[in-house]
Amino acid sequence: MPETHSNPLDDPTANPFEVAAQAAADIARLTGVENHDIALTLGSGWGKAADILGETVATIPATEVTGFSKPALEGHVGTLRSIRTPGGKNVLVIGARTHYYEDHGVRRVVHSVRTAAATGAKIMVLTNGAGGIRETWTPGQPVLISDHINLTADSPLEGATFVDLTDLYSKRLRDIARSIDPMLDEGVYTQFRGPHYETPAEVQMAKHIGGHIVGMSTALEAIAAREAGMEILGFSLITNLAAGIQQTPLSHAEVIEAGREAEPVISALLARVVEAL
């Protein structure tokens, strides 16, 4: 629905799972695909993967689906796409991510994940563009997410909802990814609130508490995916070294450019991984 209209998730009395179920019904109606097996959220630099995953069955504007908003960020396409892989899997590709810093509330941040679960998806693949803390990493390098640190001081879980986050980023799925590319490194993703980039001191804090990657998405989505019973695979594209590690100023243009240059390689990698899941 257009952003000028009210979003049902903004109503505090609304049940977010019922809204997700309605969104899933919208997707089934608009795409003609009743159920999906895998869902992908494509972050900065990962968008071209959708073009080589398989046959596109349908592409729909996300704003035609209950609860979705137009993306605020350049580099995100604002569509939902149903793709059938050569192996016959139905993949829901989410190009409409709501970031926490947009200040729409956590329900809208994780709505795409809950909707994916409601379409039947059992595996959630979350990707992003992020800053790297390890000096051995280079811009354009994909790394697996092994765990996360959530520094938003928020959660998608409501009330007395207790969810185990052990092995949140599935070791089984990471092993499958490494069977495709044995050179894949991995690290702990640290989600900051954004939208400002982290200071060098904040990057050092993240490093000292066990972080290797810094960004502004993914962690809240992963928690919601686990709550929904999905198995999660996380990928970060290292678009730059983080503040204080990299000696030049950070910019969003740099992130977009690094993603553009890496896109052919990481898209092919992601397509091969998805086919193997």
Image: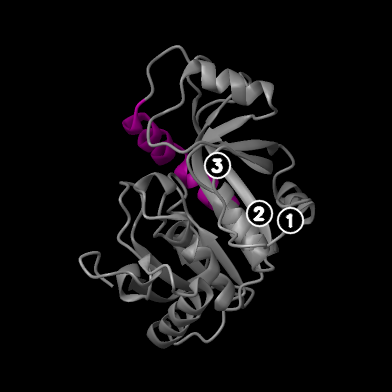
Q: Which residues are magenta?
A: 251-269
Q: Mark 3 or 1, which is nearer the eye?
A: 3
Q: Quadrant of residue 187?
A: top right
* Residue in view at x 45 percent, y 63 percent: 94
- Of the residues shown, which amino acid type is indicated by label 2? Leu
The coloring applied to the image is: one colour
- Of the residues shown, which amino acid type is indicated by label 3? Ala
Picture disc at residue 153: 3
Q: Is residue 12 visible?
A: yes
Drawn side of residue 25 relative to residue 185, left or right: left
159 within the magenta span: no
Nearer the observer, 268 or 177: 177
Q: Mark 2 or 3, which is nearer the eye?
A: 3
Nearer the observer, 218 or 136: 218
Pointer 1 residue: 173
Q: Is residue 272 visible?
A: no
What percent of the width, then of the height, locates residue 48? 43, 54
How much space separates mark 1 and mark 2, taking CA atoms?
6 Å
Pointer 2 residue: 233
User: Which of the marked residues, 2 or 3, is nearer the chain's N terminus?
Assistant: 3
**Majority secondary structure of magenta residues:** helix
Nearer the observer, 119 or 161: 161
What percent of the width, then of the height, locates residue 68? 37, 67
